[in-house]
Amino acid sequence: MRRNGTKALEIEMRVLREADYIIFNNSTIRQCGKNFMVSKSTVHKDMAERLPKINKTLFDMVQEVLKKNLSERHIRGGKATKEKYEGKVKKTA
């Protein structure tokens, strides 16, 4: 993974920190992106392309969390929508 020194090392360290964050917090790609102040696309590329080259075991662990999040996505979306409309009802009542 180390191509041109310092920048590559910074990227590698970010990828490892993101992976740890996702695993220990059961976080989504978006939550991780917000925490590290990078886009969700960057986190996705880090987890899908860079992490397997750096640490396959960590990659497998991250994939388990992301698969779980994907399977629960419809629940979180429904909950967010419900809260959104409950908030509107409370404001107008």
Image (cartoon, rainbow, N blue to C red):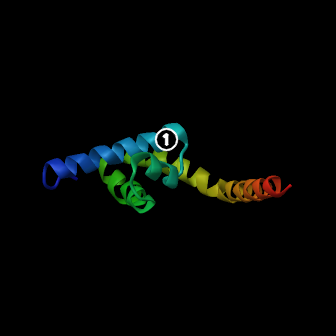
Image spot of residue 53 (x, y percent)? 30, 53
Indicate left or right for 15 with 62 as reference: left
Residue 57 appears in view: no
For the point 47% across and 47% down, the residue is: 62
- In the rendered structure, the answer to whether residue 84 lies left or right of residue 39 reads right
Q: Residue furthest bottom?
A: 41
Q: Is residue 14 left or right of residue 84?
A: left
Secondary structure under the numbered disc 1 in the rendered image: helix
Q: Percent from the top left, x then y, of residue 54?
A: 30, 48
Percent position of residue 18, x then y: 40, 45
- Tell me if residue 64 can be seen: yes
**Residue at image point 54% right, 52% down:** 66
Of the 4 image quadrants, the one containing the C terminus is bottom right
Q: Is residue 55 above or below residue 78?
A: above
Q: Is residue 82 or residue 76 the one in the foreground?
A: 82
Q: Is residue 41 above or below residue 66?
A: below
Q: In this orientation, which residue lies closer to the viewer: 60 or 74?
A: 74
Amino acid type, mark 1: Ile
Toward the right, the furthest residue is 93
Q: Position of residue 73 (x, y in %)?
A: 65, 57
Q: Say how many tags the image has.
A: 1
The residue positioned 42% from the left and 45% from the top of the image is 19
In this view, the residue farthest toward the front is 92
Which residue in the structure is indicated by mark 1? Answer: 23
**Residue shown at 81% from the left, 52% from the top:** 90
Is 17 on the left or on the right of 81, as rendered? left
Density class for disc 1 (Cα within 10 Å; few <14, some 14-19, many ≥20) is some
